[in-house]
Amino acid sequence: MLTTGKIALFVTLFVIGVSLIEACVLTRRQRDSASPFDWYEVWISLADVAGRKLLALLPLSLAAPVFALAWDHRIFTVMLNSALMVFLLFIGQEFCYYWYHRASHRIRFFWATHAVHHSPNQLTLSSAYRLGLTGKLTGSAIFFAPLVWLGVRPEVVLATLSFNLLYQFWPHNTWTPKLGWLEYVFNTPSAHRVHHASNVDYLDANFGGVLVIFDRLFGTYVEERADEPCRYGLTTPTRSRNPLVVEFEHWVSLARDIASAGSLWAAIGYVILPPGWRADGSGETTEALRRQNLVATPSPYLANSSLTAAYSLRYRASRSSVTVRCPASGSQTSIVSGDVHTCATSSFVTARRASRAAPKAAPTSPP
């Protein structure tokens, strides 16, 4: 009889086997290219899987006590006895996953683990199972505890999350093209390429697990563009081939920043504020990088315009919008980050029309 443990083992071996087949095909295809396939990235991902399997033998997870507390204080007891209840569980889990994933990018404490998943400098199927060794120790289960509190059994919540993560295996590739209308609803390879890209315009985007509906609802969806090829990895790339460095370098840097903080509030800021934040204001958060990018890349639409000096740009707290302000009149116009080429209304319309007419992104050849 198949047990949960045996099923998990078979799924793990299947996922690893498929990723190794892809690696062999890409090695052959990229053999004479400027960027040959890097097998070290695969070995580090395999080391991560092996490490997590060993750690699973130890009672180190915070999920059990968090879920037990939520279950003891549940307000209902949910029975999955209809298709509607299963669908509602799926949507609820997807909602919780969205906020877990978004927090993993926007809170440095959670990012210290999640950065391991984003450390590969090439996007392949093996990237999917490089998840970091410290995930069970950070309390991320708290994001899914509301489902248990509502009355869904903890083992059902964990099983649903496992299916979510299993779905996310296949979008980790560069060879699947855009998938038409599916791009509006699902987390596709194109959407996930954007998520893994370190380009400034693509940072902190597309957090959904199976769906992108919550990204579209909360303004974090960004489409892959032909004029902005994805660069994978971190904004400061990880070059080490030592798995221990890859796993713990972000925890070490976090501990170093906390130790050198000049005050308690600065130390807390290093833990709960976005990656790149510095107490002296000199950091490189996503917002700071976008401000720098605006200055470094002046708009071609305003290159010969007398209006260039008359308008100024400033970022909102939201990652997806910029406010254009005219110092003379005080009038302001909000535009999305993809349209930051412009300052005047007429140029703004031109930029939007140009972006809509741009060709779709072309993926690399399939294996």
Image (cartoon, helix red, strand yellow):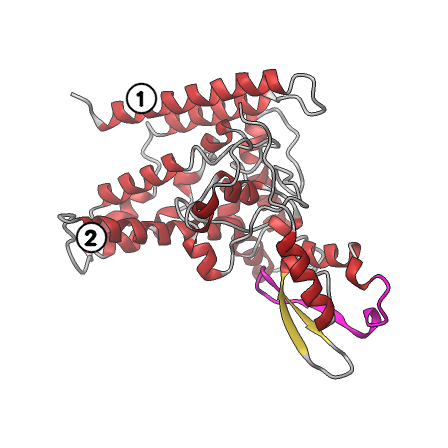
The part of the image, by quadrant, that contains residue 157 is top left
CA neighbours of label 1 inside 10 A, class few (<14), some (14 to 19), many (20+): few
Task: Residue 49: give x, y in percent of width and height.
Answer: 43, 26
Residue pointed to by mark 2 = 84
Residue that label 1 marks: 10
Residue under the point 69% across and 17% down: 32
**Amino acid type of the residue that numbered disc 1 sits on in the rendered structure:** Phe
Task: Magenta stretch: give its range.
Answer: 303-321
Write the residue at 24% across / 56% down: 149
Q: Residue at x 23, y 41 (%)?
A: 155
Earlier along the polypeptide chain: callout 2 or callout 1?
Answer: 1
Give how far across and how far down residue 212 sits, in percent. 44, 51
In the current view of this chain or complex, which residue is farthest to the front? 357
Estimate the x, y position of residue 107 in percent, counting from the top left.
52, 53
Q: Is residue 285 visible?
A: no
Is 104 placed left or right of 276 in the picture? left
The image shows residue 275 at horizontal and vertical percentages of: 59, 50
Look at the numbered discs 2 and 1 and tell me whether their residues touch, using CB distance below 8 Å. no
| The one of 181 and 107 positioned closer to us in this rendering | 181
